[in-house]
Amino acid sequence: TQCLLHYLNFREAKNPYLPNLQNALLQALNNNFSSSSLQHILTTSTSTSTSAITQNNHVTNLLHPYTLSPSHHPPLRIFVAGDKSQVGKSSVCLGLIGTLIHKYHYPPSSIAYIKPATQCEETQLVTKYCEKLNVKAVPVGPIVYYKGFTRAFLSGETESTSILLNKVKKAVDEIASQKQVVIIDGVGYPSVGSICGTDNADVALACGDSYSSDDNYNDMHKDGISNNNRNRTIPPAVLVVGKRGVGDAVDSYNLNAVYFRQKHVPVIGAIFNRLPIEKDNFYSLENCKKAITTYFNNKHNQLVYGGIHEEAFGFVPEIKGLSLDTNNDDDNVDAANAFVEVFDEHVDVKKILEKALELRNLYVGNHKDNVNDGCAGPMRKKARLVDNEIDVKMSTATKTSMVEPPPSISIHQKSNNFLPSNQILLTREEIESAAKAQGAAGG
């Protein structure tokens, strides 16, 4: 009975078509029913829902692409980037997590949230929401751009690029263990951290999932490495959070998407955030949605990279009062739930999952849970092309997740070659104290 409950927890937990079966299992577990009684209850419960399950099987398999345990497949990793700071990346992460749980019935235990690089260490609403729903979260990851960090890095007084990115990879891989979906929160705009070799594109690649092109994915992960030299990385699906407007919003999206693409990190599309709802406003949600959707749907403007068509997944209205109340967790949860409800209404989360799954299949070449039937062959071909391209051109600083790069590649390692052999790395406290004394405003 416990095994069956565990199975349902990963497959269709709280799916509207399976309440009778779950309730029967819980009753059996709690009341120690005899095997004959249990058999009767299960037979009665499942017979009333078999037809409905069959009719909904396609959607169920799509949104829960795991037959028994997520350890048999790479989890879907979604990297939420922004076209500027304070555009609402963390709010979009909150909306994704809440919609997955409340609408698509993902168990909280199957979702993870992490912000691997940050400039702000203050508690965010998404963090409180994860705590309340028991979603595993790492709100402050391995890389923190604290005051004085950049200059200390350039002086060789902090950890190197490769060490920082390896820490990111380790942290994301740990939190992704046994999960179905991992939401990764970016920092600022895409190039933030580039001076240290840890911009959002490099961090996104470090957040990718390693696999072997020859061996079974699960076999390779027994010890975390492959016995051959054909390792590949499944990059996370990058979702860009855009600003209000039309021309500036689309232009900014294209500029920021290109930054990821030139480092061979595929972008699946955008969510445009904080749009006014007043219909007489020239920049209203409806007006902007109509124009931007036309742009993305225009065949002449369709953006394709590595076989992925980029899309506008939603347009979220401005919601006032969406901030953290440090004195009242209940109010925080109420505010978060209210936002999730609005987010679900305006964003096609199902399509985001489809695109993330499509991207994963491009790299793995697994046609069994392909979103589009009949295109497994072409997608596998594209996957090989993308893999080869990444092998040759991807940032070598990020490739340190598997192989340490030559010293000449890493900005920091190169500078360290010219430092005295007795050079001592400074602590964060020492760096911050010196930076504050000199009037530093940020990292």
Image (cartoon, rainbow, N blue to C red):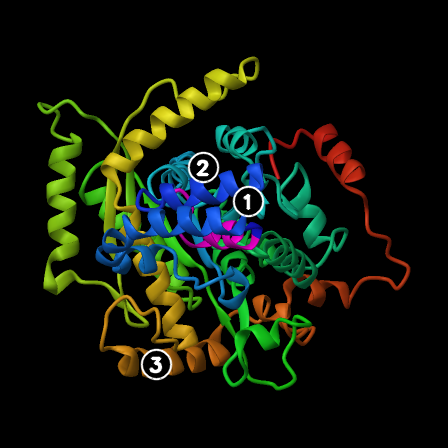
The spot of residue 9 in percent (x, y) is 48, 49
How far is the residue under mark 1 from the one under mark 2?
9 Å
The residue type indicated by label 1 comes to Lys
- Mark number, residue 380: 3
Pointer 2 residue: 90
First of labels 1, 2 by sequence position:
2
For residue 13: magenta?
yes
Residue name at image x 56 percent, y 73 percent? 218
Circle 1: is it few (<14), some (14-19), or many (20+) Cα within 10 Å? many
Dividing the picture into quadrants, the one containing residue 221 is bottom right
Question: Looking at this view, is 17 or 185 the one in front?
Answer: 17
Is residue 258 visible in this depiction of the protein? no
Residue 76, above or below 226: above
Question: Looking at this view, is 108 or 424 the one in front?
Answer: 108
Instruction: Please name the predominant secondary structure of the magenta segment in the image.
Output: helix
Residue name at image x 46 percent, y 56 percent? 77
- Mark number, residue 115: 1
